[in-house]
Image (spheres, grey):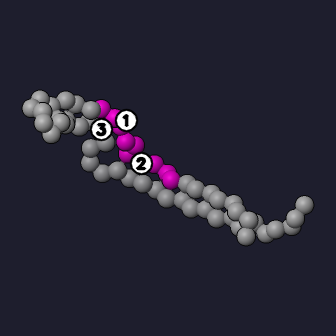
Amino acid sequence: MINAPIVLTGSAAWQHTFGDVDAETMIRFASGVSTFTVNGAALDRDQAALSAVSAPR
């Protein structure tokens, strides 16, 4: 086994969403006249973003 140093790094952040958190959009095709609604997953109002990395030096 080779003895190699390992570098550990990490980060932490807090994200807050302002305004509307619903992911609903009314769209239409460029050549179309009628619109349709696309629903996505709702956004979180508050969330933590964490990362951790270990890598050989």
Above or below, 46 against 28 in this view is: below
State the residue at coordinates (71%, 67%). 7
Q: What stretch is highlighted in magenta?
A: 39-49
Going by the numbered disc 2, the residue's amino acid type is Asp
Going by the numbered disc 1, the residue's amino acid type is Ala
Please report contact status of discs 2 and 1: CB closer than 8 Å, yes or no: no
Select label 3 or label 2 by which is in front.
3
Residue placed under numbered mark 1 in the picture:
41
Label disc, if present, on residue 46 of the rendered structure: 2
- Disc on the earlier residue, 3 or 2: 3
State the residue at coordinates (9%, 32%). 33
Going by the numbered disc 3, the residue's amino acid type is Asp
Q: Is residue 34 magenta?
A: no
Label disc, if present, on residue 31 of the rendered structure: none
Above or below, 11 against 45 in this view is: below
As rendered, which of 43 and 1 lies closer to the eye? 1
Instruction: Name the spot of residue 56 as percent of width and height, x first.
Output: 74, 65
Instruction: Name the spot of residue 44 as percent of width and height, x first.
Output: 40, 43
Q: In this view, does 2 lie to the left or right of 37?
A: right
Q: Is residue 45 magenta?
A: yes
Q: In this view, does 39 lie to the left or right of 16?
A: left
- Disc on the earlier residue, 1 or 3: 3
